[in-house]
Amino acid sequence: MAKAAANQQVKTLALDFQRANIPASTLAFEPGFIKTKLTGWRGRVDIEESCKGMVDIIEKLTPEKSGSSVDWSGETIPW
């Protein structure tokens, strides 16, 4: 339920910003299954790779993509 609420808030903020002509964008990220001590180093993605992917997405974010949910590689996550 918390994840659904967070996703809806991202979408709602994007629509509110658009209606108010506020030049801001929102995005929900799923960083991936990261190789960390917490995951016993069994993750599929290095933290550096995930972070770089998310930064690249943020740098290319357009108003049309605002309010969406994506993973660290830019794939859209439907919900």
Image (tube, grey):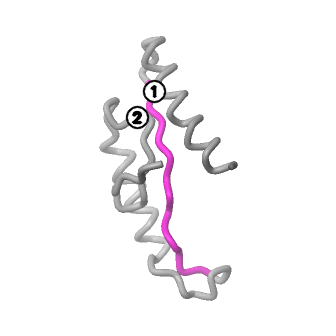
Q: Secondary structure at mark 1?
A: loop
**Marks 2,1: beta carbons within 8 A:** yes
Give residue 66's mark.
Answer: 2
Residue at mark 1 = 24
On screen, residue 1 above or below 62: below
Q: Tell me what residue is drawn at x 45 percent, y 27 percent.
A: 24
Q: Residues within 10 Å of mark 1 (few under 14, many from 20)?
A: few
Q: Between residues 6 and 74, which one lies in front from this camera angle?
A: 6
Q: Name the amino acid type tagged 1.
A: Ala
Q: Horizontal and vertical percent for residue 37?
A: 65, 83
Q: Secondary structure at mark 2?
A: loop
Q: Residue furthest top?
A: 20
Q: Inspect the image, locate mark 2, and give the three-letter code of the amino acid beneath it.
A: Ser
Return the x and y of residue 52 as percentages of the image width and height: 39, 62
As for residue 32 lying within the magenta part, the answer is yes
Q: Is residue 65 above or below residue 12?
A: below
Range of residues picked out in magenta: 24-36
Give percent across and percent down for residue 31: 50, 62
Residue plotted at (34% across, 30% down): 63
